[in-house]
Image: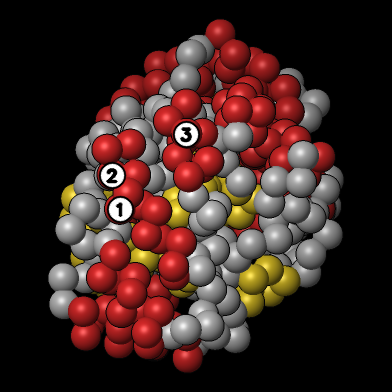
Amino acid sequence: MIIKEINIRKMKMTMKTPFVTGLGTFQEKDFLILEVKDELGNTGWGESVAFSTPWYSEETLGTNLHMINDFLIPIVLGKEIGHPDEVSQLFSTIRKNNMAKSAVEGAIWDLYAKRNKMTLGHALGGKQDKIEVGISIGIHENMADLVGTVRGFIKEGYKRIKVKIKPGHDIEVLRELRRNFPDVPLMADANSAYTLDDIELLKQLDEFNLTMIEQPLASDDIIDHATLQKQLKTAICLDESIHSLEDTRKAIELGSTQVINVKIGRVGGLTEAKKIHDYCMEKNIPVWCGGMLESGIGRAHNIALTTLPNFILPGDTAGSSRYWEKDIISPEVIVEDGYITVPTAYGIGYEPDCEAMDSYTVEYTQFKAY
């Protein structure tokens, strides 16, 4: 396939409710949507999941736009690409900037699947026709509100509850949730809010029978996590520390983690995500797909990835209505009794809602190969 055209939309969508973590609060979501076209007129779609500010990683929407416009598009525009796996090799001369790379590569994966009349899941090697999903809940200062929110999602059938914690908003929160929901699969996400100085506090997590504690220590650490894991019965899951297969290998060999959260944008695309999945499967380390508050385009990529066999834990890919009054795909992603049925249409399986997409677009840029 020859990449003949790439269009970039800068988007702004308002979430239904503010999302609160230990690192900040936001309700406006700015992001990029990429549209890639080949010489036959086929179209693939990708999404940059970088936020406007560098609270999750050093990447931002602004840096992604710069990298995509000035470096990544010139590498692939007009090029003949046999398979999407080649894209990560083409981008190998550029260090990091994984979310920018993932946006371009994801659109090319979608394009490839459509050209070959396959679903994106099948193109990746996935087999599942439906996936289990959990829900991620931001910090609630009011305990009664949090309990009510959790109860509502349990009634909707979500298979796992993830709650954000931070110092001063942790043990009592989990104790109250366990008192109200003794049997629900429950995990806590710390977003790097603790250090080894908090080890005695973190050891208290063992009383709550958590599925896991996600990224309790520094976002770039795998050494201290190994020290902490030795002191905990609760499994540590690494998120921000994992940017590649090499990071995954080192963390597992050190004993820093018992579970890996795979986020497509964080690891640089579907090709690297699949390599991490395959390695973890070989090492008997379960994986699950994390969320970045994606629109329907990014959500569809997550669904496709989660069809791979080692995604045995419910991920964060909630339905569209969890975050948006109106998503940018048709049909929207729907959760029924805690499951998403994997679409069977070619590529990502969902069609862009052009009217909705236009209404959220604040900037549009087009690149063509002549």
Q: Say whether disc 2 or disc 3 marks the residue closer to the N-terminus.
A: 2
Quadrant (top left/top right/bottom left/bottom right) for the N terminus: top right
Q: Quadrant of residue 189?
A: bottom left
Circle 1: residue type: Leu
Q: Earlier in the sequence, mark 1 or mark 3?
A: 1
Q: Residue 232's x, y, as percent?
A: 49, 50
Q: Which residue is mark 2?
A: 198
Q: Is residue 298 left or right of residue 120?
A: left
Residue at numbered disc 3: 227
Q: Residue at x 53, y 83 (%)?
A: 183
- x 75%, y 35%: residue: 279
The numbered dot on residue 201 is 1
Where is residue 91? Give x, y as percent: 58, 17
In the image, residue 194 sits, relative to residue 69, either above or below, namely: below
Q: Residues within 10 Å of mark 1 (few under 14, many from 20)?
A: few
Q: Residues within 10 Å of mark 3 (few under 14, many from 20)?
A: some
Disc 2 to disc 1: CB gap under 8 Å = yes
Secondary element at tag 1: helix
